[in-house]
Amino acid sequence: MNGKSQVMINLLRGWPNASLLPATLIKAAAESALSDPAVYSPGLEYGPDPGYQPLRELVAAWLTRFYRPSAGIDAEQICITGGASQNLACMLQVYTDPLHTSKVWMVSPTYFLACRIFEDNGFHGQLRSVPEDEEGIDIEFLRKGLVAQDKEDSQSPASSKKLKPMRPWNKFYRHLIYAVPTFSNPSSKTMSLERRQQLVALARQHDALIISDDVYDQLQWKVSPSTAESPVLDQAVLPRLVDIDRILDGGTERPGADGFGNAMSNGSFSKIAGPGVRTGWAEGTTKFAYGLSQTGSSRSGGAPSQMTATFMSKLVEWGHLEKHIFHTLQPTYSRRFNIMIKAIEQHLVPLGIKLPQTDRDVVGGYFLWFSLPEPLDADDLAARALEEENLIIAQGSLFAVYGDEKTVDLSRCVRVCFSFEDEALLEEGIRRLAEVIRRIQRENEAASSVEELKGGNRVSGSSQRNGKPVDVGQYN
């Protein structure tokens, strides 16, 4: 069967649909910024290390409105970045040392493109998988891993060595923990409040920095809105890890603490304005934010995305960005999510697939994640979906932690995205996927019947087809 005669449907690509890009709003902001010498002069010069000050102040106030922390967020706790990915690389330059920093513990399934950033900064072979349960990161698995690693490091003379020089504004953490705690990419799960508190406490015990990608937090909606229009959710459902770190058991300034904290928030305009703006922010303690601003590339070239930061500043100042989030993105993604979830319930659930965290009141993000019934294999399913139905999906193996792929079994997992493809094709994509699954199941049943007639054993795996893996270099 050749699916190429059908229009291609891409449920892998984790981008916003082009219709949701606020080009008109950004154009107005750019025209305003470029018409005012008080804005464009500093915008076109080398920016201050921590970033464009008006944007730092506006982001701090905006995040305070949304997260409602017990104490307001200060601009000195914000560092403007070139986006979440660029900032991850900068953080590793300032706050890790490949000899001193022992391991990078990554929630698995993970945002796989982060693995290369860690490896490029000297952590090839040092990435470790941490499984999830229904509350998020498996805290006991992580605890045992950290204890065992610290014991091993204490017996190794090499653990006291450092490759980089120490500077007054930085420290080198012993461990890193990487997670997307809210509407996770790829698992779509949200980490519970208790688990977040446990994670911060554990990070403190083992000198670990939690790198929290909080890029989907504002893309949220009620699972079953009581009205035809999904209600605006202008407040976070849960505190971030960085918020918890500030107040838990004395906070980041508790006796004996060094003031850098054990959690930071990686934020970005990519999911709420557009990936091409390449502008974001990092939030941590004042000490952490300052140290991050001193990374070599910022000291040399000035704050990243300085000109674009002036555009984003206008969007936030005018309230246009929040209006776009609450009145365009939230209702649109809610509608898209419901189209896809209904299609999954109609076409896939009867075939044995299972969704995580089905009891949540609030969901969000870009993705849905589900597990396949045995003996289906997600790699085989993805290859056949492309070959037979011209459908691109993301098989679980894409989201394995580099170098530690076997700790968490992702062979029967699939991620689908509802943010990118044309809305009219979302249900059709799920229907096509169901057709492929039915074919595989029928083939397995037929093969099993033949084996039983022959007196052999029941087949234990799905049929195999020749299929080339999809190039995912440009996908999120």
Image (spheres, rainbow, N blue to C red):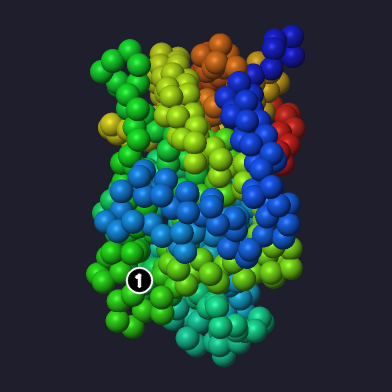
Q: Secondary structure at mark 1?
A: helix
Residue neighbourhood size for the residue with mark 1, other residues' Cα within 10 Å, grouped as few (<14), some (14–19), many (≥20): many
Q: Is residue 256 above or below residue 272?
A: below
In the picture, which quadrant includes the N terminus?
A: top right
| Residue 79 sits above or below residue 153 on the image | above
The C terminus lies in which quarter of the figure? top right
Residue 322, image x, y percentages? 45, 34
Relative placement, left or right, of 244 versus 433 is left
In the shown orientation, is residue 412 left or right of residue 71? right
Q: Which residue shows up at 47% across the image and 72% down it?
A: 287
Question: Front-most of 316 and 264?
Answer: 316
Which amino acid type is shown beneath numbered disc 1? Thr
- Name the quadrant containing residue 354: top left
| 277 left or right, relative to 415 | right
Residue at screen point 49% across, 36% down: 318
In the rendered image, is residue 430 in sight? yes
Which percent across, then down, holds residue 129?
50, 57
State the residue position of label 1: 252
Q: Position of residue 75 (x, y in %)?
A: 46, 59
Q: Residue at x 59, y 55 (%)?
A: 52
Determine which quarter of the picture holds residue 80: bottom right
Along the line of sight, which residue is nearer the eye, 184 or 305? 305
